[in-house]
Image (cartoon, rainbow, N blue to C red):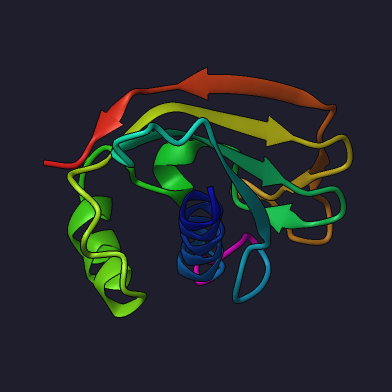
Amino acid sequence: MDDERSIIKQLERLFEERFSRSRNGSGPTCDYVFKVENLSDMLNSFDLVATFKTGQRYCCFEPGCHFGVENVFWPEFRADMARMGLDRLPRLTIFSFRCIVEKGAMMILDRDPSDPIISEAYEYTIGPFTEP
């Protein structure tokens, strides 16, 4: 369905735009890759994958620090959705939020930015998170 693919691409772009504004441990922004999967037929729930990329610096790899999907995230995200013409979508649920940390992603976490912790590859999944 073209409309579904368009919505998925718009949501992915919205997540990337919104969270590229996050600060990392040594510079002004973080670089993530987002993928929306398994969008429901009613367009109200989906799985979200966020990738912490090889060679990029982050303060940590915790979703609450970077994304805040449990609380303050939703009102601002809904406003961003309206700006992109997605305000027609019903109340959303991120059913499964999978974070992928690539081998070589760097964590600063209260360290000297010139001496980051280099991560091994791992993944974790949290959720669901529902828009209030």
Question: Which residue is at the front of the view, 108 or 1?
Answer: 1
Residue 11: image location, x then y, percent: 46, 57
Hey, which residue is sitting farthest left in the picture? Answer: 132
Q: What range is drawn magenta here?
A: 21-25
**Residue at x 34% of width, y 46% of height:** 68
Residue 16: image location, x then y, percent: 56, 63
Left or right position of 34 against 54: left
**Residue at x 21% of width, y 61% of height:** 88
Residue 5: image location, x then y, percent: 56, 52
**Residue at x 78% of width, y 57% of height:** 56
Left or right position of 20 against 129: right
**Residue at x 60% of width, y 76% of height:** 28
130 above or below 112? above
Q: What kind of secondary structure does the magenta stretch mostly adopt?
A: loop
Locate the C terminus and report the quarter of the image it occupies.
top left
Question: Which residue is at the front of the view, 131 or 7?
Answer: 7
